[in-house]
Image (cartoon, rainbow, N blue to C red):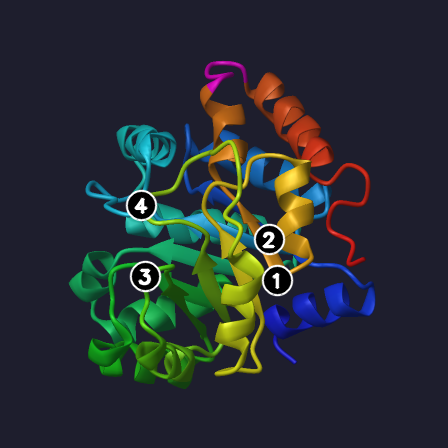
Amino acid sequence: MNRIEQAFAKARSENRAAFVAYLCAGDPDFDTSVAACRAILDAGVDVLELGVPFSDPLADGLTNQLAAQRALESGMTSERVLELVRAVRSFSDVPIVFYTYYNLVFAQGSEAYAERAKAAGVDGILTLDLPPEEAGEHLAACEKHGLGTVFIVAPTTPDERLGIICGATSGFVYYVSREGVTGEQAAMSDGIRASVETIKKHTDLPVVVGFGISNADHVQTVAQAADGVVVGSAIVNCIAENLGDPAAITAALSAKMAALTAGGALQKQ
């Protein structure tokens, strides 16, 4: 099994959902970003979703937009993101999935991008704005270099497209819990379980749920329905609220991870 498969198999064996955590690479700077990754990985993250900073992050809410802006202003480039992956690989074998936009892949060419990402230690790529119907070159490159592909299902996705999306996916399917962009929210949708069950009619791959998950109650709700729980903005805010103090950032991240998983929130009931 590859690292992604191993992570979900381990979570299943422990009767829980996998924890997928998002950070933007290079936020607020390279060294602090590496330390932030270490902090959440030490707290038990199963899959690290690493945002590749981009100037026009159309699927992201304000929290993650500002994280990308901080990273870019600190000097993050495509090459520096790969350096960061290699730095994380020096202390962790947790699967890393790039959360990126197709412009960044296209600029290098799918073949070169996939080859360089794999060599650095990346396990999968989520290209947010690439429809599977137009992803032939990208899919071929990922398959050639052993990278998992991740595609998104939205609440508005018609049933007739689910087979296409799931057929293009080789890592895990990402269900977004609401319409709109990323960001913390007060309550979760009531239809998550039914949506995940519908998706599972089209795939045997893990289905994770993200967008808006902000506290342990949300985590517990999603964990009962899905194979994985994705938390992003609630974690990224720990950085935004402690800028200029790297020690405070890592302390806040550790505390947030403990709060999100308190009371066995990831456990299946």
Bin the neighbour count of mark 2 within 10 Å (Cα to Cα): few under 14, some 14-19, many 20 and up. Answer: many
Q: Secondary structure at mark 2?
A: strand
* 69 sits left or right of 88 in the view: left
- Inspect the image, locate mark 1, and give the three-letter code of the amino acid beneath it: Ala
Left or right of 65: which side holds 16?
right
Q: Position of residue 59 (x, y in %)?
A: 29, 47
- Give whichever of discs 2 and 3 has the lower sequence position: 3
Of mark 1 and mark 4, the one earlier in the sequence is 4
Front residue (pair 20, 108): 20
Q: Is residue 174 above or below residue 111?
A: above
Taking 100 as reference, is 23 left or right? right
Q: Which residue is mark 4?
A: 180
Q: Tell me the amino acid under the disc marked 4.
A: Gly
**Counting other residues with Cα less than 10 Å from the Cα at mark 4, is it few (<14), some (14-19), or many (20 or more)?**
some
Q: What residue does disc 2 label? A: 229
- Residue at the disc numbered 1: 226
Tag 1 secondary structure:
loop
Q: Earlier in the sequence, mark 3 or mark 1?
A: 3
- How far apart are labels 2 and 3 at the CA level? 20 Å
